[in-house]
Amino acid sequence: MAKIIGEKIANIPWQEKPQGWRYPVWRYSANPIITRDNLFMANSIFNSAVVPYGDGFAGVFRVDYYSRDQRLVTGFSKDGIDWNLDEKVIFEGYDPRLCMIEGKYYLSWVNHTPHGTTIGIAYTTDFKEWTQLEDACYPVARNGVLFPRKIGDEYMLLIRPCDRGHTPYGDIFLSRSKDLTYWGKHRFVMAPVKIWESTKIGAGPTPIETDEGWLMFYHGVLTSCNGFTYSMGAAILDLEKPWIVKHRADCFLLSPHENYECVGDVPNVVFPCAALADSETGRIAIYYGAADTTVSMAFTTVDETIDFIKKNDLIK
């Protein structure tokens, strides 16, 4: 049996797998958990990040307003399902990720600059006051995801270099830093392989440390005659050299199926940005953006996901 290496989350949001469900990931029956109605003047709230905080949970949420400006706000919840969002904007940009490193909560997000998008990094201890660091890369990039601890004496950041358009380029890379300021020693991690992810891929939630390696959920994009379809896949990266892919599922684990995933501002989108993982039970709760309109939740266990990856492994 696989084991999550990390903290216990006794109050992790959870719903048992529906009877007869044969897949490793299942949706929360009351999805979506956050809609545009959660915040005044919000056109949509989606692609958002969540971490344990105090006796509950804190998050940073992407809000696209009536003006269609893309901004980040904080939110708090006792159970990880019912959220109170703060109207105060903390940063411009979109698609945040969160993790705790050495007692601080680090936020990475797609930061707007006059020259294109880059990866912003900031930290907080209380989700009220933030310290912004230097951007982690030169424009243009998206999907910047920090690992939740140093590996050796270096911080690690997954990233997808791209251009100012929406699609090129499609591969995941890794950058390293000793101080969260100067980034380098870049390594290729993986590229699209199968049809379901053939346009581009990007890292999703903070990687989950397990005794099998780093469990990385990611999104993959298919371009069809009807446009883009975003789905969620999974891979296992080496613990000490996370640019090495040990196992990788050849198929998606979650793809647009329900109405709230297929209909919205951007149809046919499942975009994972956060995952809570309980080391005691092996339970994992995944937060994902649905149709670029709402936040929804899905569940799995570390055993079911890793077993599924290995049974459908691209890495021979």
Image: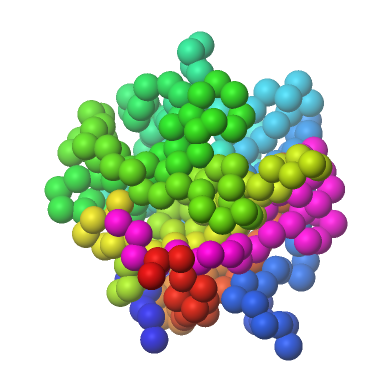
x and y percent of residue 84 in the render? 66, 49
Q: Is residue 300 above or below residue 217?
A: below
Q: Residue at x 62, y 47 (%)?
A: 221
Q: Is residue 281 visible?
A: yes
Quadrant where the C terminus is found in the figure: bottom left
233 horizontally vs 278: left or right? right
Quadrant where the N terminus is found in the figure: bottom left
x and y percent of residue 252 in the render? 60, 62
Number of marks in picture: 0
Q: Which residues are magenta?
A: 244-272
Check the image and tell me how it is coloured. rainbow
Q: Residue at x 78, y 61 (%)?
A: 257
x and y percent of residue 29 in the render? 76, 70
Q: Is residue 49 visible?
A: no
Q: Quadrant of residue 174?
A: top left
Q: Residue at x 71, y 69 (%)?
A: 28
The magenta stretch spans residue 256: yes
x and y percent of residue 152 in the render? 15, 53
Relative depth, front residue between 196 and 211: 196
Q: Is residue 62 above or below residue 220?
A: above
Q: Quadrant of residue 65?
A: top right
Q: Residue at x 76, y 40 (%)?
A: 227
Relative depth, front residue between 190 and 279: 190
The magenta stretch spans residue 212: no
Relative depth, front residue between 281 and 152: 152
Magenta residues, dominant SS class:
loop
271 horizontally vs 168: left or right? right
Q: Is residue 56 above or below residue 264?
A: below
Farthest top residue in view: 114
